[in-house]
Image: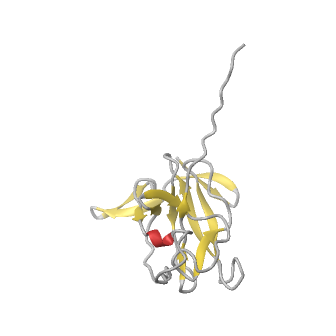
């Protein structure tokens, strides 16, 4: 069974996504079937260069971000405008899921004209995968010269040691 957060509650669902294989739709795990986004211009550290737009991209399925061949994630904070290879960078308002295997819906904002959510927002889905990376079911932004940002991500591991007397 697969768990998904809906309206703040974790519920079991049968399938997260389908792919068309051998003439039939088959249930797939987005942690296994995703498209890699290896575009280094998406980095929060990029402020110069050509302006990119994700509005007209054909977003199909799930995506995993990489920067310099290292797993990355969408920022959870208001990224300054003219970053990430675009005019108005896209970021998520709520935190990434902390539990592995849970899919959550997150609101995507954009930074422009001294506002952290200038253009209309939209929603995406996010899943934390077993090896501590994230995959995203992305949607096109509401205007052009908006593009998804990415930043490096190092998972924090908490070790608990039990000592016996």
Where residue 42 sits in the image (x, y, percent)? 50, 71
Q: Name the residue located 53 percent from the left edge and 80 percent from the top edge.
A: 86
Above or below for 158 versus 19: above
Picture quadrant where residue 76 is located: bottom right
Quarter residue 152 falls in: bottom right
Q: Position of residue 135 (x, y in %)?
A: 50, 59
Which residue is most to the left?
22
> Looking at this view, is 31 or 46 the one in front?
46
**The furthest residue to the front:** 48
User: Is 44 located above or below residue 10 in the figure?
Assistant: below
Q: Is residue 12 above or below residue 45?
A: above
Residue 134 on image: x %, y %: 52, 56
Task: Name the foreground residue: 12 vs 68.
Answer: 68
Scheme of image coloration: secondary structure
Which image quarter holds the C terminus? top right
Name the residue: 52% across, 68% down.
43
Residue located at (63% from left, 65% from top) = 106
Percent from the top left, x then y, of residue 96? 62, 57
- Which residue appears at 65% of the width and 27% of the height? 161
Report the number of discs: 0
Question: Is residue 17 or residue 129 the one in the foreground?
Answer: 129
């Amino acid at each position: 069974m697969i768990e998904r957060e809906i309206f703040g509650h974790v519920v079991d669902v049968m399938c997260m996504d389908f792919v068309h294989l051998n003439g039939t739709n088959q249930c797939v795990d987005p942690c296994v079937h995703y498209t890699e986004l290896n575009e280094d211009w998406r980095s929060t550290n990029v402020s110069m260069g050509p302006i990119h737009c994700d509005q007209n991209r054909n977003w199909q399925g799930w995506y995993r971000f990489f920067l310099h061949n290292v797993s990355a994630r969408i920022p959870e904070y208001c990224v300054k405008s003219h970053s990430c290879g675009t005019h108005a960078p896209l970021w998520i308002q709520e935190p990434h899921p902390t539990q592995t295997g849970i899919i959550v819906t997150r609101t995507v904002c954009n930074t422009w004209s001294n506002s952290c959510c200038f253009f209309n927002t939209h929603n995406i889905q996010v899943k934390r995968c077993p090896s501590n990376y994230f995959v995203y079911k992305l949607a096109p932004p509401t205007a052009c010269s908006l593009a998804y940002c990415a930043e490096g991500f190092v998972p924090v591991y908490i070790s608990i040691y039990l000592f016996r007397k």
